[in-house]
């Protein structure tokens, strides 16, 4: 491949790469939704212990919904019991931050059947705390965080909130009767 | 004739793929930066790459699809280099056992697996082939005036 390399060819290649990069930087600077080039931080790894590991992966609601059909996927809701009762991703288990020790043990047994856990809360940060805690407990499954929390899920109008979600139905806590 | 058909097939395939990949990453650069960050290779460069890569891919895609022959060859060379870097990145992820989404085609690209590595190797090979097919004809083939 390299035998046909000449100066004009290399210059054209560099022009394409650099031109594209400069164009991208210019448009990124001009658009309101551009990424911040300095000070970018992933929204997880909030503790020193967590930072030593790979960061918890965030997923957009649409990415998370694509996992719903997959076996071994479980959604965990970290919000309050009242919020959980008012509405949640179908077949999600309740896993609040202030869970009692015995409640946490029961939840951990349920979680142990899952290969992938998508944790969501009222916000990304709330879910990230619980996700980091799960990982620090040595769970080997894939723990992910729903970006934007349950409100983002609702805003996307995703089916799991009101429709069937067979892949999520691995374990299910019974909801209290109204 | 066969060479010309193969050349156009490669131009359409690779050019279309680059255009699609760039366009799909375009809408949400912050999410793309997070996906690059998850590779744990050059986390500090994640926002810079997220801002530039989609445009680079679109430029390369357009050059492959509609550029004149010398620019097609140059874009094939640049594309092969870019795809080579992608291949190293995904192979590294697989080797380290990091479970992340690829981000190759924006949201919902699926996880990085051995298939991702294999796909990238095939794309690198396609880039090399396009580079060779887009070469100018040898001087001896030009009839003397």
Image: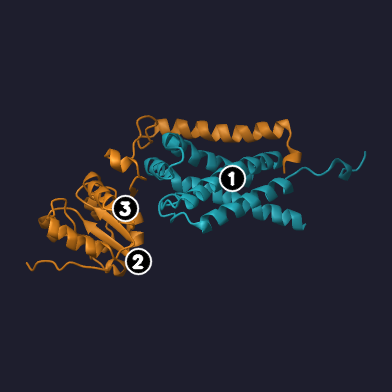
Describe the element under mark 2 as helix, strand or loop. Answer: loop
Which quadrant of the structure image shows residue A4? top right
Nearer to me, A114 or B2: A114
Q: How is the image coloured?
A: by chain
Q: Position of residue A56 (x, y in %)?
A: 33, 48
Q: Quadrant of residue B63?
A: top right
Specify whether A136 is left or right of B80: left
> How busy is the neighbourhood of tag 2: few (under 14 within 10 Å), some, or many (20 plus)?
some
Of tags 3 and 2, the one toward the viewer is 3
Q: Secondary structure at mark 1?
A: helix
Q: Which callout, 3 or 2, points at the residue further toward the start of the chain?
A: 2
Which quadrant of the figure contains the C terminus of chain B?
top right
The disc numbered 3 marks a residue on which chain? A
Residue at x 48% of width, y 36% of height: B52
Q: What's the colour of chain B in the image?
A: cyan
Q: Is residue A105 above or below residue B54?
A: below
Of badges 1 and 2, nearer the viewer stands 1
User: How far, Cα to Cα, is label 3 from label 2?
Assistant: 16 Å
Q: Is residue A16 above or below residue A162?
A: above
Instruction: Give the label on residue B84, or none.
Output: 1
């Amino acid at each position: 491949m390299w035998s046909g390399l000449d100066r004009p060819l290399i210059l054209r290649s560099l022009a394409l790469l650099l031109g594209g990069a400069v164009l991208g930087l210019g448009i990124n600077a001009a658009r309101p939704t551009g990424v911040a080039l300095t000070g970018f931080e992933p929204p997880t790894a909030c503790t020193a212990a967590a930072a030593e590991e790979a960061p918890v992966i965030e997923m957009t609601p649409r990415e998370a919904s694509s996992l719903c059909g997959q076996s071994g996927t479980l959604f965990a809701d970290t919000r309050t019991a009242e919020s959980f009762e008012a509405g949640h991703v179908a077949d999600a288990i309740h896993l609040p931050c202030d869970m009692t020790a015995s409640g946490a043990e029961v939840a951990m047994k349920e979680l142990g059947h899952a290969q992938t856990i998508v944790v969501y809360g009222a916000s990304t940060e709330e879910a990230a705390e619980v996700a980091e805690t799960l990982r620090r407990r040595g769970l080997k499954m894939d723990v992910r965080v729903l970006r934007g929390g349950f409100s983002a899920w609702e805003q996307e109008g995703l089916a799991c909130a009101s429709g069937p979600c067979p892949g999520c139905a691995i374990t299910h806590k019974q909801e209290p009767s109204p | 004739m066969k060479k010309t058909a193969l050349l156009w097939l490669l131009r359409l395939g690779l050019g279309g793929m680059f255009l699609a990949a760039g366009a799909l990453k375009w809408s949400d650069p912050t999410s793309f930066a997070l996906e690059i960050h998850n590779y744990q290779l050059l986390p500090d460069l994640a926002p810079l790459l997220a801002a530039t890569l989609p445009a680079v891919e679109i430029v390369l895609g357009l050059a492959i699809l509609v550029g004149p022959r010398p620019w097609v060859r140059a874009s094939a060379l640049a594309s092969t280099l870019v795809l080579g870097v992608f291949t190293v990145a995904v192979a590294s992820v697989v080797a380290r056992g990091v479970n992340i989404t690829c981000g190759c085609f924006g949201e919902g690209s699926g996880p990085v697996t051995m298939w991702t590595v294999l796909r990238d190797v095939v794309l690198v090979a396609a880039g090399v082939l396009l580079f060779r097919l887009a070469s100018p004809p040898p001087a001896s083939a030009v009839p003397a005036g």
